[in-house]
Amino acid sequence: MWTFGRKLSMGFALSFALLLLIGTLSYRGVELMTQTSYQVTRTHAALTHIEALMSLMKDAETGQRGYLLSGDEPYLEPYRHAVANLPRQLAELKPLIRDNPAQQARLNQATAMIEGLMQLHKERIETRRASSTEAAMRVLGLGEGKRRMDELRGVISQMEEEENDLLRQRAQEVESAAAGVRMAIVWGTVAGALLVLAAALTLNRALSGQVGTAVKHVQRSSAELQAAANQQAAGARETATSMTEISTTISELLATSRQIADSAQRVVGIAEQTAGLARGGDGTLQAARETIAAMRRQIDLVVDHMLDLGRKSQQIGVVMDLVGELAEQTNILAINATIEATVAGDAGRRFSVVADEIRKLADRMTASTKEIRLQIDDVRGAVNTTVMATETGSKAVDAGARQFDDVAATFAKIAGQVVTTTDAAREIELSTKQQATAVEQLNVALSNTAQASRETEASSGQTSQTATELAEMSRDLLRLVQAQPT
C-alpha cells in the first residue's frame, strides 16, 4: 500500500519528468530556430555581398565605358571604387558560404571572371589613354566585355538563386521547429494539467483518508490522556491528604520523642544521684539504711520509667511501621506517576520530575524509618538491661536488709549497677535525641512530599487542559481535511 508521502513524491516526480521533457523539447526547438536564424542572417549577408559584387562590376563597366567614350577622368571614379572594394567584398563573401561547396565553386568561377573583366577594363582604359576615340570604339564594338559580363551575371544569378533556395529551406526548418515547440508546449501543458488534476484528486483522497484516520487516532489518544490526567489529579489529591495525616502523626511522634528525651535525662540525673548516695553509704549504718531505702525508691522509679519507656518504644515502633507502609505506598505511587508521565511524553515531563522527587523523598523516609527502628531496638535492649539491673539491685537491697553485715559488699554491687544504669541512661538520652532529629527530618520530607503532591495535582490539571485543547485542534484539523463536520 502506497503511503501519502510516496504518492506525493510520485506526483512531483511525474510532474518534474513532464516539465523536463517539455523543457528539453522546447530548448531543442529554440536552439534549432536560433541556429537557423543565424544561418538565415548569414544567407542574407551573402546575398548582400553578391549583390554588392554585381553592383561594383556594373559600376566598373559603366565607368570604363564612359571614359572610353568621353576620355574624361571623372568617369573613372566608379571604376576606381570597384577596384578598391572588390577584393574586400570577395574576402567577406568567402567565409559566408564556406559550408556550401557548390557556392564556393561558383564563387571561384565568379572570382576568375571578375579578375578577367577587370583586366579587360584596365586594358581598354590604357588603350583609350594611348590612342584615339576611334580605336576605343572599335574595341567596344567587338562585344567581348558584354559577353563576359553576361557570363558573370549568369554565375551571380545562380549564386543568388542558391542563396534564395537556402532561405526558403531554412524558413521551412524554422516553421517546422516552431510547430514542434508549439506542439510540445500545447500537449505538454495538456498532459501536465491532466497529471496535476489526477495528482490533486489522488492526494485529496489520500489526505482525507490517511490524515483523517491519524486525526481520529489523535482524538482517541487525547481522550485517554485527559482521563489519565484526571486519574493522576485524583491520586495526587489522595497523596496530599495522606501526607497531611502522616505529617500530623510525625508531629505527635516528635513530641513523644522529646518527652522520652526528657525522661532519659531525668533518669541520668537520678542514676547519678544514686551513685553518689551509694558511694556515701560507708558513713553510718543509719545513713546506709536510709540510702538503701532511698535507692529502693529510686530503683522503683527507674523501673517505672523504664517500663514507660518500653511502652513508648513499642508505640514508636507501631508508628514507624505505619510510616514505612506509607513510604512504600508513596514510592509505588511515584513509580506509577513516572510511568504515566513517560506515556504522556513532553506534556508529562514536568510531572515526571515531580514524581521522581516524590520517589526520592519516599526512599529517604524509608531509610530514616529503618534507622529509627534500629534506635528503638537499641532503646528496648537498654530498657531490658536497665530493668534487669534494677531487679538485681532490688534483690540486693532485700538481701542487704536481711544481711546487714554484707551492706558494704551490697553497696559496692549497687554502685556498679548504678554506673551501668547511668551509662545506659546516657545511651538512651543520646538515642532519643537522634530519634528526635530523624523525626524532624522526616517531618520536613513529608512537608516537601505534600508540596510536591499539590504541584502534581496542578500539573495534572494543566495536562488535562492540554489534552482538551489537543482534542479540539484535532477536530478542527479533521473538519479542514474532510470538509465536513466530524
Image (cartoon, rainbow, N blue to C red):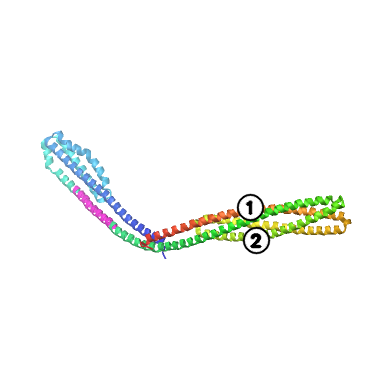
Q: Is residue 378 above or below residue 112?
A: below
Please identify the residue farthest to the bottom as the structure is shown.
Answer: 1
Q: Decide: marks 1, 2 in contact (CB < 8 A)?
A: no
Residue 9 picture location, percent across and down: 39, 59
Amino acid found under the numbered disc labelled 2: Asp
**Residue found 10% across the figure and 37% down from its top:** 134
Disc 1 designates what residue?
441
| 140 or 88, nearer to the observer | 88
Q: Earlier in the sequence, mark 1 or mark 2?
A: 2
Q: Quadrant of residue 128?
A: top left
Neighbor class of circle 2 (other Cα within 10 Å; few <14, some 14-19, many 20+) is some
Residue 298 picture location, percent across and down: 78, 55
| 154 or 415, nearer to the observer | 415
For residue 321, the mark is: 2
Residue 450 picture location, percent across and down: 57, 55
User: SS of the residue at dot 1?
Assistant: helix
Horizontal side of 419 relative to 350 (left or right) equals right
Horizontal side of 194 relative to 51 (left or right) equals right
User: SS of the residue at dot 2?
Assistant: helix
Q: Quadrant of residue 339?
A: bottom right
| 218 or 355, nearer to the observer | 355
Amino acid found under the numbered disc labelled 1: Gln
Magenta region includes residue 176: yes
Neighbor class of circle 1 (other Cα within 10 Å; few <14, some 14-19, many 20+) is some
Residue 44 picture location, percent across and down: 23, 47
Q: Is residue 322 above or below residue 134?
A: below
What's drawn in magenta, residue-wise? 156-184
